Image: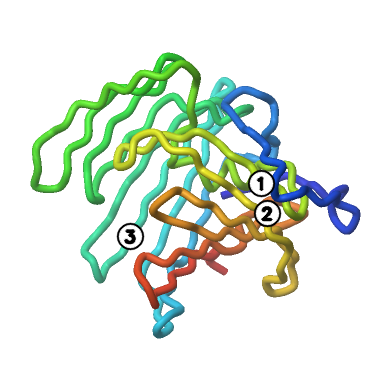
C-alpha cells in the first residue's frame, strides 16, 4: 500500500459526473504506479465497531525486480488462529498480474495470469483441490491488487472507475471504484475511494500527496467495522 506525488490535483481537481465511468484495463496507461517503492511496511488491524480492539497485524514487503513488482504479505489474526501468507507478482508499470500464491487463509490458492485467461488451483481448508481454468478475450487484474489499483487512479472528486478483476472465490467481476471526496486523517489529507467488489465494499483513504494508504475500512457483517492503518 504505497504512492506517488499528485499535488497538482489538490484544490483544483476537476469534478467527474457520476455518469462518466473511466474504464481501466491492464496495460492501458491509466494507472500511475511510479509511487510503488521497495521496502517493508507494517499495519494494524483494529475493530472499531461495535467495540474498539486491536485484532491483528499485516506486514507487507515490496521487491522490484526487472520491471516486475513482487509483494509478499503476512496477515496475522490471533483470535481466529489465522496467519495468511500471500505472494503476488505483477508488471510494476501497469499492475498486469502474473502470479498469485496464497496460503494459511480460507484456501490455498495458486494462480497464473495470462493474456488468454487465468489457470491454477484452489484448495479450501479441509476440502478438495479445485482446478481453475478461466479463459477471457482480454487481460484482467488480480483482485488481490485492488487496493493498489485504487491508489493508482487519476484522482478527482466524483471519478468513477471500473476495472475487470479475477478472484479465486468470485471469478470474473467488475470492480467499481468511486472517489467520493477528501477527508483528514490526523494531520494528512486523503482521497476517499469506495471500492465495490459485488458482495463486498471497501473504503480506502489514500494520501493526496504520497498515495500512501492511510486507512482501509471494511464491514464483514452488519454492525462490525474493521480498519487497517499504518503502524506508528
Q: Tell me: 192 left or right of 41.
A: right
Q: Which mark is residue 76?
A: 3
Residue drawn at x 65%, y 24% is 28
- Measured Cα–Cα span from mark 3 to mark 2: 30 Å
The image shows residue 25, relative to residue 147, as above or below, that is above
Residue holding disc 1: 160
Q: Where is residue 174 drawn, in percent x and y? A: 49, 38
Asked whether the residues under the numbered discs 3 and 2 touch, taking CB atoms below 8 Å apart as contact, a structural biologist would say no
Residue 33 visible? The answer is no
Q: Position of residue 139 (x, y in %)?
A: 49, 21
Q: Position of residue 77 (x, y in %)?
A: 31, 64
Residue 189 lies left or right of residue 47; in this view the side is right
Sequence-first tag of 3 and 2: 3
Query: Circle 2 is placed at which residue position?
Result: 179
Q: Quadrant of residue 179?
A: bottom right
Is label 1 in a helix, a strand or a loop?
strand
SS at mark 3 in the image: strand
Amino acid at each position: 500500500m504505497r504512492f506517488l506525488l499528485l499535488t497538482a490535483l489538490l484544490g483544483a481537481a476537476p469534478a467527474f459526473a457520476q455518469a462518466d465511468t473511466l474504464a481501466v484495463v491492464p496495460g492501458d496507461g491509466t494507472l500511475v504506479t511510479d509511487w510503488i517503492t521497495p521496502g517493508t511496511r507494517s499495519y494494524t488491524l483494529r475493530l472499531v465497531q461495535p467495540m474498539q480492539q486491536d485484532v491483528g497485524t499485516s506486514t507487507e514487503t515490496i521487491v522490484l525486480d526487472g520491471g516486475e513488482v513482487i509483494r509478499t504479505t503476512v496477515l496475522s489474526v490471533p483470535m481466529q488462529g489465522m496467519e495468511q501468507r500471500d505472494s503476488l507478482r505483477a508488471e510494476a508499470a501497469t499492475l498486469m498480474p502474473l502470479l498469485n500464491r496464497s496460503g494459511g487463509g480460507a484456501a490455498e490458492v495458486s494462480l497464473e495470469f495470462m493474456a488468454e485467461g487465468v489457470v491454477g488451483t484452489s484448495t479450501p481448508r479441509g476440502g478438495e483441490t479445485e482446478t481453475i481454468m478461466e479463459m477471457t478475450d482480454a487481460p484482467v487484474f488480480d483482485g488481490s491488487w485492488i487496493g493498489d489499483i485504487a491508489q493508482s487512479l487519476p484522482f478527482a472528486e466524483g471519478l468513477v472507475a471500473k476495472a475487470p478483476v479475477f478472484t479465486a472465490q468470485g471469478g470474473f467481476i467488475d470492480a467499481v471504484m468511486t472517489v467520493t471526496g477528501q477527508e483528514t486523517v490526523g494531520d494528512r489529507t486523503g482521497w476517499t475511494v469506495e471500492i465495490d467488489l459485488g458482495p463486498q465494499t471497501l473504503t480506502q483513504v489514500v494520501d493526496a500527496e504520497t498515495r500512501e494508504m492511510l486507512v482501509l475500512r471494511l464491514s464483514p457483517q452488519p454492525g462490525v467495522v474493521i480498519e487497517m492503518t499504518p503502524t506508528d
